[in-house]
Image (tube, rainbow, N blue to C red):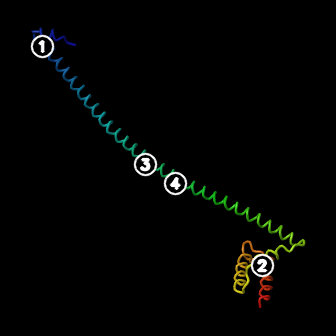
Amino acid sequence: MIDWETVSRAEDADGLKEAKIWLFQENIRLENARRELETSQEKFLKERIRMRREMEELNLRMVQERKRLREENLFFEKKMAILQDGFRKLDEDRRSFERQRKLFEERAAGRGREETGGLAIEESVRLLFRGANNPLALRKRYRDLVKIFHPDNLFGDEELSQVINREYLRRKSREE
């Protein structure tokens, strides 16, 4: 390093020449440092731009991913609602089936009692025809009962259907 006081006091040509050389070298060094600084600044700016682009891309991906997750959640909730509704319907069907099974068992038990000596079915059928006093009402009541208790129906009963037919014929012949 050159002391400026020494350079300013130098009056001989060698001292001035040495000061000029030092100034030239210092100028080159400063110019190189300035270029390095500008290069570094450009690199930093490019890096900053690249980082901004990456951040924008990541933000865009994150927004898209959130949207996809929201849609998946909605889809999942819809599927869950469908499954819950299905299970609810299955439970209702199971309960309905249990009621029908109990009804069937009760009818089967009633038939067993009837076979053992009771005329409960015939008495029940007489009650079903009660109030059918004219031929038109008798025919309508008969058709309704046959629709309900026909053996081809879900809860139809062949024996009950035969008793209904016998009672209809009995009442019809009585009216003629």
- The kind of secondary structure element at disc 2 is helix
Q: Is residue 72 above or below residue 139?
A: above
Mark 2 and mark 4 in contact (Cβ < 8 Å)? no
What residue lies at 48% left-to-right and 49% top-to-bottom?
Answer: 70
How far apart, in angstroms, are the residues tagged by discs 3 and 1?
70 Å
Label 3: how many Cα within 10 Å (few below 14, some 14–19, many 20+): few
Task: Find residue 16 and name its label.
Answer: 1
- The kind of secondary structure element at disc 3 is helix
- Looking at the picture, tell me which residue is in the foreground, 154 or 149: 149
Label 3 vs 1, first from the N-terminus: 1
Mark 1 and mark 2 in contact (Cβ < 8 Å)? no
Q: Which residue is mark 4?
A: 75
Residue type at mark 1: give it: Leu
- The kind of secondary structure element at disc 4 is helix
- Looking at the picture, tell me which residue is in the foreground, 1 or 125: 125
What residue lies at 69% left-to-right and 86% top-to-bottom?
Answer: 136
What residue lies at 10% left-to-right and 12% top-to-bottom?
Answer: 13
